[in-house]
Amino acid sequence: KVDGRGLLLAGGNGVGTTGGQSVHARLFCGGVAHNSGTVPLDAEGDFRIEDVLSPMPPSPCASPILLIVSGIAPAGNWFAAGIPK
């Protein structure tokens, strides 16, 4: 489960909007990527991902790194790192 808030464009003609963007989560375990499904940003730039990763990560996950990625999974570029709560 991943929650994010306030992902709005900071420049250009769409400043202060989502620009119609979608995001997904990418977990790296020992250098291998595991992606969630893609979700759209709401009007305030908030999102919630409640999904199963593909492929399923191993347990335990070696050296986990969680990234938030723009675009449709599995493509896209990461722009934020997840912080466990």
Image (cartoon, rainbow, N blue to C red):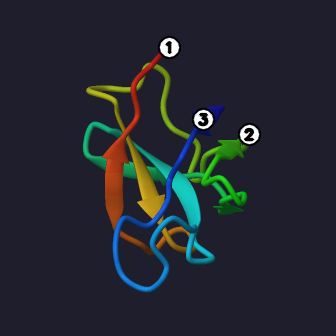
Residue found at x 44% / y 67%: 9
Mark 3–mark 1 Cα distance, whole angstroms, equals 10 Å
Whether residue 75 is situated above or below residue 54 in the rendered picture: below
On the image, the x and y values in percent for residue 3 come to: 61, 35
On the image, the x and y values in percent for residue 55 come to: 56, 52
Q: Which residue is mark 3?
A: 2
Whether residue 33 is situated above or below residue 77 in the rendered picture: above
As shown in the figure, which amino acid type bears the numbered disc 2? Glu
Residue found at x 50% / y 13%: 85
On the image, the x and y values in percent for residue 22 come to: 60, 67
State which quarter of the image contains the N terminus: top right
Q: Earlier in the sequence, mark 2 or mark 1?
A: 2
Mark 3–mark 2 Cα distance, whole angstroms, equals 7 Å
Badge 2 density bin: few <14, some 14–19, many ≥20, Cα 10 Å: few
Q: Which residue is mark 1?
A: 85
As shown in the figure, which amino acid type bears the numbered disc 3? Val
As shown in the figure, which amino acid type bears the numbered disc 1? Lys
Which residue occupies the foreground of this view, 54 or 2?
2
Which residue occupies the foreground of this view, 37 or 41?
41
Q: Which residue is mark 2?
A: 50
Q: Quadrant of residue 77?
A: bottom left
Residue found at x 50% / y 53%: 7
Badge 1 density bin: few <14, some 14–19, many ≥20, Cα 10 Å: few
Q: Earlier in the sequence, mark 3 or mark 1?
A: 3
